[in-house]
Amino acid sequence: MPWRVKMLNLDPIWMPDAQQIHFRLLLDAMARPGKCHSLTIAPEEGPAVLTVLATLLDAEVLLADPHTLLRSDDWHMLQVASAVVEQADYVICDGSRAPNFTPKLGTLPSPEQSATLILVVDELGQGDASLRLTGPGIADTESLLIKGLDKQWLEMREDWVCSFPLGVDLILLDGRQITALPRTTKVEML
């Protein structure tokens, strides 16, 4: 009986080359808060949120999805364990919905054991949320417009980062762009 091999056809977001490119974009976003970076994939090659998650996650971290943004197939492909928000290393949320939780903030001996929040918004570079950013990685100030972000995220973020080095880092993304607000960035709502 001849062997039949069935090939698995993966979207580019699951390939190492694409993940390396997007990892560099995420690093640059963290190093230059508020600057928007375009993802290099076409919409039909996978959702932006999956691109970011496929780049950052592995079997060693915990992910929370309190707004059920991921499908069961996505969880299978990510091969990551789910957790409650308070214990998760990464939390993916709908940015238009107000937060009703407190994520991991780290500890003084290990502030890096805090959560990274990934907020899906309608659009970066447009919108009613106007922010002025200052801090490391910003020469003077950086302006950022966001459509589809509940302002309570920014209010809660202030509470979460007020005991630096404890806090959270935010990654914001729309359908095609990402930006970041590390815990060291000062955010002023205009």
Image: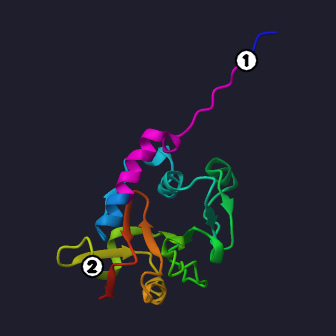
Residue pointed to by mark 1:
4
Locate residue 115, reporting x and y percent.
54, 72
| Residue at figure coordinates x 43%, y 39% from the top left | 17
Residue 158 located within the stretch drawn in magenta: no
Residue 190 horizontal side relative to residue 141, left or right: right
Where disc 2 sits, the SS reads loop
Please state which of residues 149 and 87 is positioned toward the viewer in this rendering. Answer: 87
In this view, which residue lies farthest toward the front?
109
Residue 134 horizontal side relative to residue 123, left or right: left
First reached walking from the N terminus: tag 2 or tag 1 = 1
Q: Is residue 79 above or below residue 110?
A: above
Locate residue 50, reporting x and y percent.
53, 54
Marker disc for residue 26: none
Q: Nearer the viewer, mark 2 or mark 1?
A: 2
Q: Is residue 41 visible?
A: no
Residue pointed to by mark 2:
135
Q: Which amino acid, mark 1?
A: Arg
Report crowding for label 1: few under 14, some 14 to 19, many 20 or more residues within 10 A (C-alpha): few
In this view, which residue lies farthest toward the right?
1
| Residue at figure coordinates x 63%, y 47% from the top left | 77
Quarter-wise, where is residue 1 in the image?
top right
| Residue at figure coordinates x 41%, y 46% from the top left | 20
| Residue at figure coordinates x 50%, y 53% from the top left | 47
Q: Is residue 135 visible?
A: yes
The region drawn magenta spans 4-26
In this view, which residue lies farthest toward the left?
140
Q: Which secondary structure is most common in the magenta stretch?
A: helix
Locate residue 31, reporting x and y percent.
31, 65
- Which image quadrant: the C terminus? bottom left
Where disc 1 sits, the SS reads loop
Please state which of residues 137 and 67 is positioned toward the viewer in this rendering. Answer: 137
